[in-house]
């Protein structure tokens, strides 16, 4: 296999992985416009990537508290460092339905999120990547334990 053909195959594999991985991946630019929207996000939001690309995150999802989210995201852009949110701070970033309707008791998906800076070749950061984790089972277990404590 030629080097360029192998590189193209690897790129195709990478894109397939990003679309089917069981976490949400969202890339936002400096104006909080969506640049990438993977299959997890599509499946849980009902919005295709072509419906989100170039659109403002806060206009697409009014449940995302703009002031709070920007307070989390701005240091990621400015300091080129990661930030994290956990469901105990805020139960979810995106109000998705619980995707385990039979075994799950939650009305919504509990989420943890990681905000990662995406650096340009010159070291500046104009984009961030959100990774959204479904932690509903862990959250429900912890809430159940809290109910049992005196």
Image: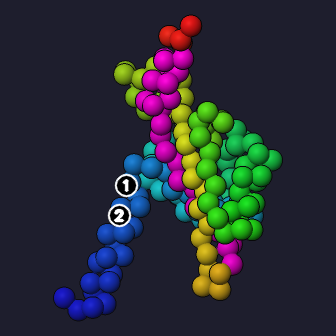
Q: Residue furthest front?
A: 150
Residue 55 on image: x %, y %: 68, 58
Asked if labels 1 and 2 touch by Cβ distance under 8 angstroms, the answer is yes
Name the one closer to the observer, 15 or 78. Answer: 78
Residue occupying image coordinates x 68% and y 72%? 126
Residue 97 seen in this snapshot: no
| Residue at left offset 50%, top offset 29% | 139
Q: Disc 2 to disc 1, how far (Cα)?
A: 6 Å
Question: Which residue was labeled with disc 2?
Answer: 16
For the C terminus, the image quarter is top right
Picture coordinates of residue 29, whole percent (x, y) = 67, 66
Q: Which residue is mark 1?
A: 20
Per the rendered image, the range of residues in magenta is 124-146
- Camera-nearest residue between 44 and 111: 111
Q: Residues within 10 Å of mark 2 (few under 14, many from 20)?
A: few
Task: Give the vertical position of 13 relative to 143 (above or below).
Answer: below
Q: Indicate whether residue 135 is drawn in magenta.
A: yes
Residue 17 falls left or right of residue 46: left
Q: Residue furthest left?
A: 1
99 relative to 38, above or below: above
Classify residue 136 as left or right of residue 62. left
Q: Which mark is residue 70?
A: none
On the image, which quarter does residue 33 sit in? Answer: bottom right
* Residue displayed at 39% across by 67% down: 15
- Dot 2 lies on which element? helix
Work out whether residue 77 can be spotted: yes
Q: Residue at x 68, y 53 (%)?
A: 57
Left or right of 70 in this view: 29: left
**Could you say whether the residue bearing mark 1 is in a helix, strand or loop?**
helix
In the image, residue 132 lies at what x, y percent? 53, 48
């Amino acid at each position: 296999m030629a080097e360029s053909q192998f590189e193209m195959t690897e790129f195709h594999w990478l894109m397939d992985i990003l679309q089917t991985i069981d976490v949400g991946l969202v890339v936002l630019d400096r104006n909080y416009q969506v640049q990438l929207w993977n299959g997890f996000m599509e499946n849980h939001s009902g919005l295709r990537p072509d419906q989100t690309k170039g659109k403002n995150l806060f206009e697409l999802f009014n449940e995302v508290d703009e002031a709070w989210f920007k307070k989390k995201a701005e240091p990621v852009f400015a300091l080129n460092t990661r930030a994290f949110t956990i469901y105990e701070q805020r139960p979810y970033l995106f109000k998705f339905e619980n995707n385990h309707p039979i075994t799950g008791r939650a009305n919504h998906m509990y989420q943890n999120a990681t905000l990662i800076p995406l650096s340009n070749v010159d070291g500046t950061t104009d984009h961030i990547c959100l990774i959204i984790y479904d932690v509903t089972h862990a959250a429900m277990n912890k809430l159940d334990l809290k109910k049992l404590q005196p």
